[in-house]
């Protein structure tokens, strides 16, 4: 069922609660399951928050139907799970894990250490009124890993251990308190502590833009150092928050091949393909931001030609991933459907359409192009 105006515009959803009654069942029951189409080649995951209580039953049906892996968007991050030293809040994460287990869904823990100062509680780097020592920060890292990864040992088999530690600039590591207080081995220590807390878990380094040549070089250097020093790492997570008509297909493939040669697997961990371009947000020192805050070009619906281009680009991406299933093991979409996407709020509030299910829980052209790619590959 297409919700399309005669002008060729896909209409924006009416309020979610009003449409689930007739849309959810069709989306969950009558369309071929994406995880089934990818079975034996790729795990298909989705990132969700406050599962299951934050979701309607029709959304949960969609999740169960199409995905076999789940990632918590925010609930397991240090800032949320231990906002004060020694004060852990496991209510949401326990519910998340219980739901996943009851529905036979694999869990990716996300994440143990987000190595950005603005995503770390201030207490983590303090000793009273003073700055914490290296030893104190390392002690807190170990205790956090034991408390969180240790709690879910045997339940969470894969962890995003360190998130966004590599620099976007000329430095090797991101300038931060993580780097200045611990030193250059902070990422290594994170992986050692995670392995100590959960020796059976697959451990992931997760970052954005690591498919770009400059940042890829840093990634490969990190992996070689880890291999030389016996640091446990199993997977590289390429985040994949790409923009329509700007997907770096060649760089993605080169990165997959380079990581695979080092004996490490790859996952696309946070996939979406936004249709509202956001690159100008950071350009020219941010001088365009006031203008962009007013920009909402598809508030009334997404043009069909835009969705068609998006579908073709999703399909081309999956063609690349299927060429390298000896290295690529998982794709996780960052949000269940367009109405749940962070792209609607970041970096400014707008109406975006970056995922493969629309706000009515209906599969979009991108969904069908991905399934077509999987089926065509299976026939070869």
Image (cartoon, rainbow, N blue to C red):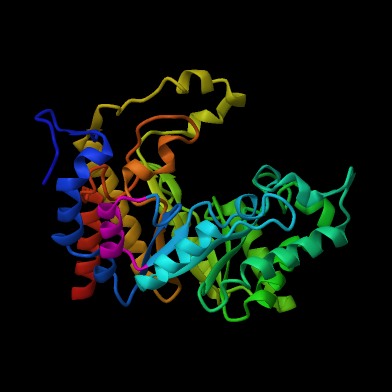
Q: Is residue 31 above or below residue 175?
A: below
Span colored in magenta: 55-68
Residue that appears at 58% across and 81% down? 200
Q: Is residue 157 above or below residue 238?
A: below
Residue 256 in sight: no
Quadrant in the rendering for residue 149 = bottom right
* Viewer-proximal residue among 22 and 41: 22
Left or right of 98 on screen, residue 12? left
* Viewer-proximal residue among 132 and 174: 132
Is the magenta region chiefly helix, strand or loop? helix
Residue that appears at 20% across and 61% down? 372
* Viewer-proximal residue among 272 and 344: 344
Residue that appears at 14% across and 39% down? 3
x then y, percent, for residue 176 = 75, 47
Judge whether residue 66 is colored magenta: yes
Left or right of 55 on screen, residue 195? right
Quadrant in the rendering for residue 323 = bottom left
Residue that appears at 22% across and 74% down? 378
Residue 61 in sight: yes
Q: Is residue 220 above or below residue 304?
A: below
x then y, percent, for residue 15 = 26, 35
* Viewer-proximal residue among 19 and 43: 19
Judge whether residue 170 is colored magenta: no
Left or right of 193 on screen, residue 13? left
x then y, percent, for residue 354 = 35, 44
Quadrant of the rendering where the C terminus is positioned: bottom left
Quadrant in the rendering for residue 195 = bottom right
Q: Is residue 219 above or below residue 276?
A: below
């Amino acid at each position: 069922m297409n919700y399309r105006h005669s002008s060729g515009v896909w209409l924006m959803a009416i309020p979610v609660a009003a449409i689930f009654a007739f849309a959810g069942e069709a989306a969950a029951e009558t369309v071929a399951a994406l995880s089934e189409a990818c079975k034996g080649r790729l795990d298909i995951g989705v990132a969700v928050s406050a599962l299951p209580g934050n979701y309607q039953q029709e959304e949960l049906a969609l999740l169960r139907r199409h995905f076999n892996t789940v990632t918590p968007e925010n609930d397991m991050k240090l800032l949320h799970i231990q906002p004060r030293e020694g004060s852990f809040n496991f209510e949401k994460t326990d519910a998340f894990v219980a739901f996943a287990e009851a529905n036979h869904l694999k869990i990716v823990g996300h994440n143990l250490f987000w190595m950005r100062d603005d995503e770390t509680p201030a207490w983590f780097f303090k000793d009273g009124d003073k700055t914490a020592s290296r030893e104190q920060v390392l002690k807190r890292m170990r205790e956090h890993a034991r408390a969180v990864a240790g709690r879910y040992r045997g339940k969470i088999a894969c962890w995003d251990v360190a998130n966004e530690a590599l620099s976007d600039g000329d430095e090797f590591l991101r300038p931060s308190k993580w780097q200045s207080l611990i030193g250059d081995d902070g990422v290594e220590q994170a992986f050692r502590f995670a392995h100590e807390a959960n020796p059976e878990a697959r451990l992931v380094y997760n970052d954005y833009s690591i498919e770009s040549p400059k940042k890829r070089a840093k990634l490969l250097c990190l992996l070689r150092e880890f291999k030389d020093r016996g640091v446990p790492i199993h997977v590289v997570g390429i985040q994949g928050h790409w923009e329509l008509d700007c997907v770096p297909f060649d760089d993605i493939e080169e990165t997959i091949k380079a990581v695979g040669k080092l004996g490490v697997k790859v996952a696309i961990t946070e996939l979406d393909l936004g249709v509202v371009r956001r690159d100008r947000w950071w350009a020219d020192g941010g001088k365009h931001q006031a203008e962009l805050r007013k920009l909402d070009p598809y508030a009334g619906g997404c043009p069909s030609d835009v969705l068609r281009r998006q579908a073709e680009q999703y399909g081309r991406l999956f063609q690349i991933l299927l060429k390298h299933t000896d290295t690529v093991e998982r794709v996780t979409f960052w949000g269940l459907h367009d109405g749940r996407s962070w792209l609607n709020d970041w970096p400014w509030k707008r109406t975006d359409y970056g995922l493969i299910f629309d706000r009515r829980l209906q599969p979009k052209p991108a969904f069908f192009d991905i399934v077509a790619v999987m089926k065509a590959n299976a026939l070869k």
